[in-house]
Image (cartoon, rainbow, N blue to C red):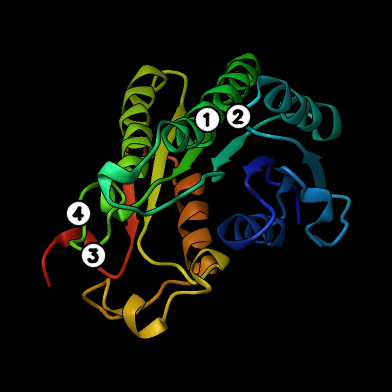
Amino acid sequence: MANKGTVIVTGGSQGIGAAIVHAFLDRAYSVVATSRKITQAGLSPSPNLALVDGDISHAATAQKVVGTAVQKFGSVDTLVNNAGIFMAKPFPEYTIEDFRALVSTNLEGYLHITQFAVKQMLAQKSGGSVVAITSSMVENPIGGLAVSIPMITKGGLEAITRSLASEYSKEHIRFNAVAPGVVDTPLHKNNPKDFLKTLSPMGTISTAAEVASAVVYLTESRQITGEVLHVDGGAHNGKW
């Protein structure tokens, strides 16, 4: 099968990120995956997979990741901004340190790597795709889940997705987002499954592979840009 291009995946060591890495490798893409300790994450070595350790909130990490993609595989065709941190607590209990940690990873992490990737895509003159991972709770908060400050960052990602989709439509660089609800990942390992199932009208918990397939869909759909695709069992539709 012919190689379909080069994909960068941030936060690729576990959960949704690891599922995205595997989904693209299975479809004959080359992948550059990054996280703080991704070389220790147990991903199987492959000629089509490059691993870069580093903190995505640092511009130097982002530059190294994009440089690795170009050096090893010759291009940057797709970027999946999956790296993110999340916490839940009542609004008055969030500290400024919490806020800065969320902004650092979720927003600065997006900013640096996306700037370097877009510059490379513009130089290639062959378009490209950027997909962010946000949250269904941006549009539909759930009573009892106090995540106001993380949603500042996730909502910001949806806003910049729409802005950049417009800014780079003539260059055919497409910007979309996948907004998961509850996903069966290590993030929820201590949460009771029966409770998690109440957080969607379908009463289901998404798998990481189901989120990854939505990312692949947006990547390969040449006419979709500025879209937020919800993978949440219908939670974004509101009360149930």
Task: Report, in whole angstroms, how far the alpha carbon at label 3 lies from the one at label 2.
Answer: 30 Å
Regarding mark 3 in the picture, which secondary structure is present there?
Answer: helix
Tell me where residue 165 sits by quadrant.
top left
Task: Report, in whole angstroms, how far the alpha carbon at label 3 lies from the one at label 1.
Answer: 28 Å
Lower sequence index among marks 4 and 3: 4
Q: Nearer the viewer, residue 162 or 17?
A: 17
Residue drawn where x is 23% and y is 64% of the image: 235
Lower sequence index among marks 3 and 1: 1
Residue 66 at least partly seen:
yes
Q: Residues within 10 Å of mark 3 (few under 14, many from 20)?
A: many
- In the picture of the structure, the residue carrying the numbered disc 1 is 104
- In the picture of the structure, the residue carrying the numbered disc 3 is 235
Lower sequence index among marks 4 and 2: 2
Task: Report, in whole angstroms, how far the alpha carbon at label 2 lies from the one at label 1.
Answer: 6 Å
Task: Report, in whole angstroms, how far the alpha carbon at label 4 lies from the one at label 1.
Answer: 24 Å
Q: Nearer the viewer, residue 72 or 240?
A: 240
Residue drawn where x is 88% and y is 57% of the image: 45
- In the picture of the structure, the residue carrying the numbered disc 4 is 140
Lower sequence index among marks 3 and 2: 2
Q: Amino acid at mark 4?
A: Asn
